[in-house]
Image: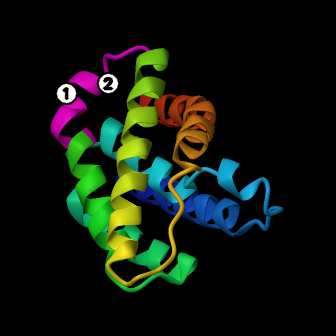
Amino acid sequence: MKESDVGLALIISILLASVLQLVPVSGYLLVLKPNFLLLVVIGWIIFRPSQWGIGFAAFTGLLADLIFRAPIGVHVLLFSTVGAIPLYLSGWLVYFSLIHRCLFVFILIIFAEFMRNMLLSMWEIPIDYSYIILSALASAIVWPAIDQLLIKFNRKR
């Protein structure tokens, strides 16, 4: 595929993840809502590590700061740090089975949520650690759809 098609697919996936992130949900379901922006960043870094890396993760983190109304820099640091892990392991992750990538995403989201809570605690924002496992589980359940779409797109190259 042409480079412009890759860029268009990236923009569409970021916009779709932003819309899904902004969809209002009930208070009880809020803990089950995955961080779609982070999942899209992880997916693009796994399947296109030479094109989308830490800078892409940082830019998407800045977008997440604006969407979540968080202090500027919290999600930039979070997305950059979390994005570095699949970037470092991208040579292996492409060959993992879908179940293993889901497990990887589950563990990565747990790490990301702990890190996010620690960063927010620096501003003395009230945090709750009880939702982390549920959020990671929801992300792992949503991951196969993102994974399969990115695999399908990357096979067209």
Q: Which residue is mark 1?
A: 91
User: Which image quarter: residue 57?
Assistant: bottom left
Estimate how packed mark 2 is, as few (under 14), some (14 to 19) or many (20 or more) residues with alpha carbons within 10 Å: some
Based on the picture, tell me whether residue 96 belongs to the magenta stretch: yes
User: Which image quarter: residue 142?
Assistant: top right
Residue drawn at 77 percent across, 53 percent down: 29
The reply to whether callout 2 and callout 1 are in contact (CB within 8 Å) is yes
User: Which image quarter: residue 15?
Assistant: bottom right
Q: Which residue is mark 2?
A: 94
| Res 1 seen here | no
For marks 2 and 1, give the CA distance: 6 Å
Residue 100 percent coordinates (x, y) = 41, 18
- The three-letter amino acid code for the residue at tag 1 is Gly
Q: Which mark is residue 3?
A: none
Q: Which residues are magenta?
A: 86-97
For label 1, the SS is: helix
For label 2, the SS is: loop
Q: Taken as a whole, is the magenta stretch helix, strand or loop? A: helix
Based on the picture, tell me whether residue 45 belongs to the magenta stretch: no
| Res 144 seen here | yes
Name the colour scheme. Answer: rainbow
- The three-letter amino acid code for the residue at tag 2 is Val
Vertical relation: 134 (above or below) 16: above
Residue 55 percent coordinates (x, y) = 23, 65
Residue drawn at 55 percent across, 28 percent down: 148
Q: Nearer the viewer, residue 13 or 71?
A: 71
Hey, which residue is sitting farthest left in the picture?
88
Vertical relation: 81 (above or below) 59: above
Residue drawn at 58 percent across, 46 percent down: 135
Q: Could you tell me which quadrant the C terminus lies in?
A: top left
